[in-house]
Image: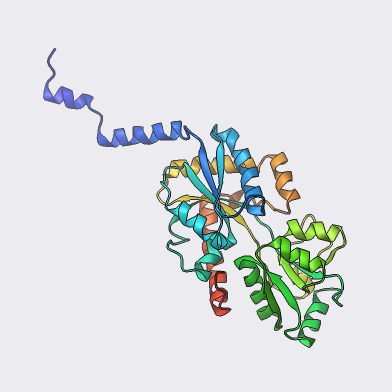
Amino acid sequence: MKFSRRRFLSLVPSAGSLSAFARGARAQVYPSRPLTLIVPFAAGGPTDTIARIVAEGMRASLGQPIIIENVGGADGSIAVGRAARAAPDGYTISIGNVDTHVLNAAAYALSYDLLNDLEAISRLTDAPAFIDTKLSLPVRDLKDLIVWLKANPDKASAGVFATWGRLFGAYFQSSTDTRIRFVPYRGAAPAMQDLVAGQIDLMFDQAGNTLAQLRNNNIKVLAVAATKRHVLAPDIPTMDEAGVPGFTLSVWHGMWAPKGTPKDIIAKLNAAIVTALANPVLQQRLIALGQEIPPRDQQTPEALSAYQKAEAEKWWPLIKAANIKGE
């Protein structure tokens, strides 16, 4: 049976329909194999723990396991660079926080663009920072602390770690017109150990470390840098309430994919995260770590992208003015 040229062409799908078919087929089959989630810090830390909890929750929606790959070094900038260079096929994604995906751009000379070389998937958690002091420091509240610091310039020592900790210290000094000696640490655990032992006077830390020590009466906690009191520490005032208005800083977490990852894949990953974060059991596990889950309208890719840019506009000038450099 012979076909005319016109008949033959009528049976050949157009390029547009083939493209649409390919997109639809991809959306239906993705993911067809396990995913890799790059974590920019060592196993066992807050970011790693959050990553494992959320990844476990995403598995039911995606139908595939998510393999955690811990890549440490340079405040997470090595891992983020690796994630930015990965194939944009949805099989390599990354988790990060305000340090790795905002502050490092001002503190390090990066080989990638934090705001433009990654595709936002979803904001995951918020964790406002606290101001902690050793028990023997002669202050009862934040106002007392500020008075004491002004009377003793450069005498108080504050343990700092990561870029956000150094930023918190610079932000606090500029907001209160005080001067503090900063003692660098490699992580929160050794800094907290020295605070409990009375070797340093102050520390800026997240709820996970802070509240455990507060419950054991090992430290004083003067304020939380948030717009509302923390659900696990309702007796601790906000910075606004304590006398330093407008002072907020959250060590929030989000998830990203390499630039160019198709929108339908981003949508599927986002839907898996949103479903996981809505699970009451998973929520309680995150809350127990001192994390807060952002409202549903703040879990979209667009919301994370806008929030990341707003944080950059807020913090980059202060980091540069304080001459905070990556270590």
In-image side of 56 versus 199 (left or right): left
Q: In this view, does 185 lie to the left or right of 102?
A: right
Residue 57 placed where, x, y %?
63, 39
What residue is rendered at 46% in x and 65% in y? 110
Q: In this view, does 187 lie above or below 92?
A: below
Residue at 63% over, 53% down: 47
Front one among 255 and 228: 255
Identify the residue shown where x is 59% and y is 55%. 41
Q: Is residue 233 left or right of residue 186?
A: right
- What residue is rendered at 48% in x and 35% in y? 31
Q: Where is residue 124 in the image (x, y as percent from the top left)?
A: 61, 50
**Residue 130, picture quadrant:** bottom right
Residue 170 or residue 227, whichever sits in front: 170
Q: Quadrant of residue 222 in the image?
A: bottom right
Q: In which quarter of the image is residue 172?
A: bottom right
273 vs 306: above or below: above
Expressed as whole percent of the image width and height from the top left, the position of residue 219 reads: 83, 66
Report the quarter where the C terminus lies: bottom right
